[in-house]
Each structure stands twice: as C-alpha cells, then as structure tokens.
Image (cartoon, rainbow, N blue to C red):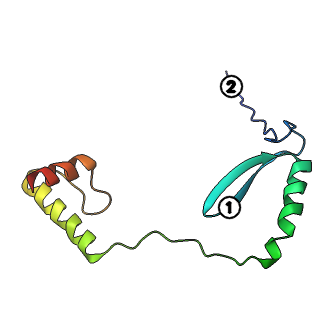
Amino acid sequence: MATQTTVTVTCDICGGTKDARTRTISLDGRALEIDLCGKDGRALDKAAQKFVPFARKVARESAPRRTVSSRQHSADVRDWARTQGMVISDRGRIPADVERKFAAAH
C-alpha cells in the first residue's frame, strides 16, 4: 500500500492557503522564514521595495579555514589513537569518543 503525504502551506498572517509560499527575510543578522499567501506576500514586497534599492549585496560567509594548529591537533589525535590500538581513518571527522579519550589522556 502506498502512502501519499500532502503539505499545505498556510499564511502565517491570515491563515489563507491561496498562492501561499515560504519567504525568507534577513534582518540584523537573523535569517527568518514566514509563510505568506499571495496578498500578504505582495504587501511584504511593497514594504521592502522602499528599502531594497538602497541596500548592498553581502557575500555569504564561508566556513572558517582550518589552521595549522588544528591540523596538527588532528594528526596528534590520530597518531595517539593508533598507538592505543584504535582503528581511525586518515581523513574526515574524528569520532567524539576518540577526542574525549585523547583529552582525558593528556
């Protein structure tokens, strides 16, 4: 037997479902989502039109780069784990339990 799930987006302002969709806005460093019907979505667009022409684009922040010391720490943990007889990969995330055991031993 097949199961079909239907998701209905409902406007957070009026509760309507006609032309409702999720909108993402960002203000003061906080990204927010709101579900709006067509009417309330147009009201948001109208309000934003006053400010958007004066705004500037912001580049997305990339993930912080790994430092030499963090790479060295990872290498130290891997070496220590191998001397303890643990099986650990050469790349990727170090399991939390291995990190805890390393910290307890040092």
Is disc 1 placed on a helix, strand or loop?
A: strand
Q: Secondary structure at mark 2?
A: loop
Q: Which residue is denoted by mark 2 in the rendering?
A: 2
User: Which quadrant does the N terminus fall into?
Assistant: top right
Residue 36 in picture, x, y percent from top left:
82, 47
Residue at the (24%, 63%) spot, across then down: 90
| Badge 2 amino acid | Ala
Which one is in front, 69 or 93?
A: 69
Q: Residues within 10 Å of mark 1 (few under 14, many from 20)?
A: few
Picture coordinates of residue 80, whole percent (x, y): 11, 59
What is the quadrant of residue 31 in the picture? bottom right
Q: Of 68 and 11, which appears nearest the observer?
A: 11
Question: x, y percentage for residue 64?
Answer: 42, 71
Please tell me which of labels 2 and 1 falls first in the chain. 2
Answer with left or right where residue 29 lies relative to residue 94. Answer: right
User: Residue extending furthest top?
Assistant: 1
Query: Disc 2, disc 1: CB below 8 Å?
Result: no
Residue 26: give its label: 1
